[in-house]
Image (spheres, rainbow, N blue to C red):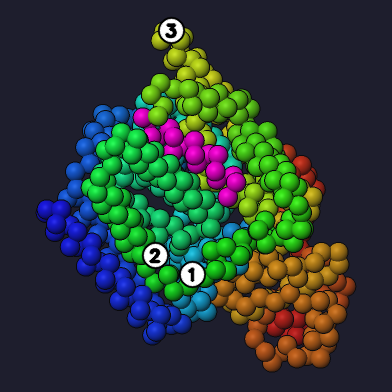
Amino acid sequence: MTHKMLFINIILVFFITIILDLLHKYFFQNQLNFIFFTVWFTIIIAIITTTISYTPFPIISKLIQGMKKEWKTLLGILILASVTRFFLLGVYPFVTTGDELRDAGLNGLYLQLGVTKDVFGFGSYDGYGNFIPLIAQLMSLITGSTSLSYLIPSALVGIASICVTYVLGRLLGGKTVGMIATLLLIASLSHLHYSRTELLVIMDSLLSVGLLLTAWFAVRNKIGFFLLGILAGFCFHFYAGIRGMLFAIVIYFLCLFLYQFSTLTFQKKLSLLHVKKIFLICVLIFTGIIIGLGPTINSLSNNILFNRVGTTTPLFHNSPFLQKSVSEKIAHVSELAHKSFFVYTFENTSTHFPYKAPLLAFPINWLFLFGVSALILREKFTRNKLSFLILIAIFSIPFTNEVLVNHVGADHRLMSTVPIITVVAAFGLDALTKRISSIYRTPILALFLIIFMALQFYAYFVNRLSDLDYEKTGTKEYTLQMMLKTAKEQSQYEKTYIINNHPHNYDFMHYQEKIEFLLYPQKGQVISKEEFLEKLASRSLEKGMNSLVLFEHPISDLIPYAKLHTFSCYENYLLPHYFCPIATKQPYSFYSMSTSDYYRDSK
């Protein structure tokens, strides 16, 4: 296929996408549109495959040939990544609650039930596209309405991000850097946590490296800008955090183009041909973005793009900040920027992952800083465009994802940078040890990595860093988890009542979401003790459906008709009992009762 035919195919796909967008907007935006999604996604795969198949990418061919020779290394990485991501998945973290259950699980169920009709719309608080719940909904066809519907995809995405990180590290500094980077990422506490919890967040770690690699390839072949545009548009279907990487790439190409234009102008070599090349690149990127966005373009708005970033108010809409003087604004932004960058190394994170620590553990944080210096000072830095791109990304993303949203320390918003900063740390370790004799260097590096990874895995799996939030609440979260597990196993009941008796309160939004999702297809309701006893006494439940009643603390009127479920917690010298709170040795329990059995036995 000639370049002319390829461009004709691109134009054809562009206009087909426009037609799909118009049909979606005027006829199918508020209807179930899985057929539209299937058609659009098929077109995306077809044009990407065609473009890659008929466009020469010598660097990719060399990379593939090199990786074929290293298949044993890659297989080892894949096995280690898979074991650490799938080990005890669904058991640890044992408690299932929070954003991950709603964003992927419950919203995926809403897609299945038709409550959410538009696949190309946006999810909760407009922070992400519906492709996240769509992935979970498709997985639920195998796993059912369980947390595994989004935990398995999370683990798979985490593994994929580790594999592409090897490619990025290898391109930046060779096989050694690629190997070190993947091992550091496999042992990363934040990456481990999100690979086992939040599909929404861990997806950023895969997309960000994909964007970096595609941008780097685009510099070497203009048609790569089309692929970059498709991936950029595709990113809008996922978490808003990935848009920081898009901003970094825009800065990168602006710097490259300005440098080229200024150099050509100074040398008096600037011609109309160069202007045409820039125009062609812009057309390719724009065309790719429109195709990658697809019908989601109809759901984009100022609110989605700028005004809302989860539960926080962006800095440029924050009243206290806007009332400051210019000098005060500069000082405030500078302080936030300083703190946001050092979230990589010394500033503790504050959200989602309960373990409050910098993204890079000691001594990797110092290796990262050394790696940044080594990248800046490396020979032929100005010609090594990948180094330049990586540096722009690690400096700009904290600004867009934390400073501008006025929330420094939000680890989930920086997950797109975690694979990249581990590559930089690996580059630093490689540069630091290069002068050591090869006889000693390999065993020293191996010993260092083995010790570091062993300590990281021990801290994560044995000290249960993902469970720290529930240490304060004691058995509350674990009791509810066991209640719902017990109710789901008893499919003969059509409805489950959870009595909200003091001192625990299950009316919180995340508990309501958890009950609705994990009990499906049963119905669940949180009800006060007084209201339930009144319904029971009036016999209003007798003629209704057979219901299961769950309550945590003894209720004298119900104890004679209820079954006690007790769970023992004791010390285990190998692995903790993940279904028990941290450092808890006392058992916990709850009661279950059938309304039908109650009315029968009370006669």
Which quadrant of the figure has residue 161? Answer: top left
Residue on which the image places disc 3: 437
Q: CA distance from mark 2 to mark 1?
A: 10 Å
Magenta includes 83? no
> What residue did someone put label 1 on?
300
Q: Which residue is mark 2?
A: 293
Decide which of 212, 159 is in the foreground and name it: 212
- The image shows residue 584, relative to residue 473, as above or below, that is above
Distance in Å between CA atoms under marks 3 and 1: 56 Å
Q: Residues within 10 Å of mark 1 (few under 14, many from 20)?
A: some
- The main secondary structure of the magenta stretch is helix
- In the rendered image, is residue 494 in sight? yes
Q: Earlier in the sequence, mark 3 or mark 1?
A: 1
Q: Which amino acid lies under the numbered mark 2 shown in the image of this protein?
A: Leu
- Residue 526 in the image, given as x and y percentages of width and height: 73, 74
Position in image of residue 542 (x %, y %): 72, 89
The magenta span reads 383-400
Q: Is residue 154 visible?
A: no
> Foreground: 348 or 536?
348
**Residue ID at (85%, 80%):** 530
* Residue at the spot 46% in from the left edge and 37% down from the top edge: 390
Secondary structure under tag 1 reads loop
Residue type highlighted by circle 3: Ser
In the picture as drawn, the residue positioned furthest to the right comes out as: 556
Residue 394 shown in magenta: yes
As drawn, is 454 to the left or to the right of 80? right
- Sequence-first tag of 3 and 2: 2
Residues marked 2 and 1 touching at CB (< 8 Å): yes
Local packing at callout 2 (Cα closer than 10 Å; few below 14, some 14-19, many 20+) is: many
